[in-house]
Image (cartoon, rainbow, N blue to C red):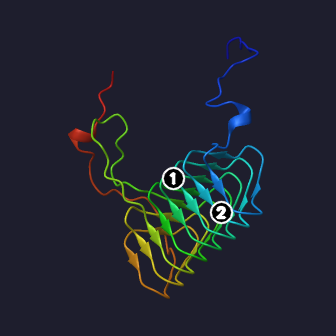
Amino acid sequence: MGKLDFYDRPFKRTRPQDDLIHFETKFGTNVTVGFGVVIDENCRIGSNVFIGHNTVIRSGVKIGNESIIGHLVVIESDTVIGERVTIQSQCHITKFARIDDRVFFGPMAMCINTKNISHGRGFKPKLQGPRIKYGARIGSGCILLPGSEVGVNSVVGAGALVNGIIPDGKIYYCKEMVAKAQGTVTRREMLKNE
């Protein structure tokens, strides 16, 4: 490895340190916000909500009363989270997700809102967030694909991939999750090596 140069300011901030929470954010009473939390414009945070350290909440998010948002969580724009929801640390909640009251997310669970990975490919993805209904429990490391739905009081075991509808009151878990060949990338989706 060659010589490394270090600078006093090797990066620039996306916003000033003292302006991490947008002034238009509406808070209920008794809200606890950890260190380094970023909240963008047009968000509404209910009463008795806890938001852990270094969490990012993008524009237009609504979080209901008595919910817990863990550390290092990312909640993308235009997501609605109900009351008494627990989202454990390091989860990713995608744009347009709908999470009803009393839902539980284990650590590192994630939502995905498009089937097309469009980066650099010149087409606009169609976005559709998942829907998680009342009292559902999502295990650690689960992945909820676009348009998927988890029914009322259903349980999804750790590491499962949800692609479709899980009926109310059912338990789904992952028997095996191994990548298998399923086809070839189309020319339309190929990046040119420049």
Point out which mark residue 107 bears.
Answer: 2
> Quick check: 61 above or below 4?
below
Q: What x and y, as percent, mark residue 190?
A: 28, 37
Residue depicted at x 27% and y 45%: 185
Q: What x and y, as percent, mark residue 111?
A: 49, 60
Point out which mark residue 60 bears.
Answer: 1
Quarter of the image with the C terminus is top left
Between marks 2 and 1, how big is the CA–CA gap? 24 Å
Q: Which is more toward the observer, 28 or 36?
A: 28
Q: Amino acid type of disc 1?
A: Gly
Q: Residue furthest left?
A: 187
Residue depicted at x 50% and y 75%: 175
Q: How many marks?
A: 2
> Quick check: 26 above or below 11?
below
For mark 2, give the secondary structure.
loop
Determine the image quadrant of residue 135: bottom right
For mark 1, give the secondary structure.
loop
CB within 8 Å, label 2 to label 1: no
Q: Amino acid type of disc 2?
A: Pro
Which numbered disc, 2 or 1, marks the residue closer to the eye? 1
Q: Is residue 2 left or right of residue 174?
A: right
Q: What x and y, as percent, mark residue 116?
A: 33, 50
How busy is the neighbourhood of tag 2: few (under 14 within 10 Å), some, or many (20 plus)?
many
Point out which mark residue 50 bears.
Answer: none
Q: What x and y, as percent, mark residue 149?
A: 42, 73
Q: Is residue 119 left or right of residue 83?
A: left
Residue depicted at x 60% and y 46%: 24
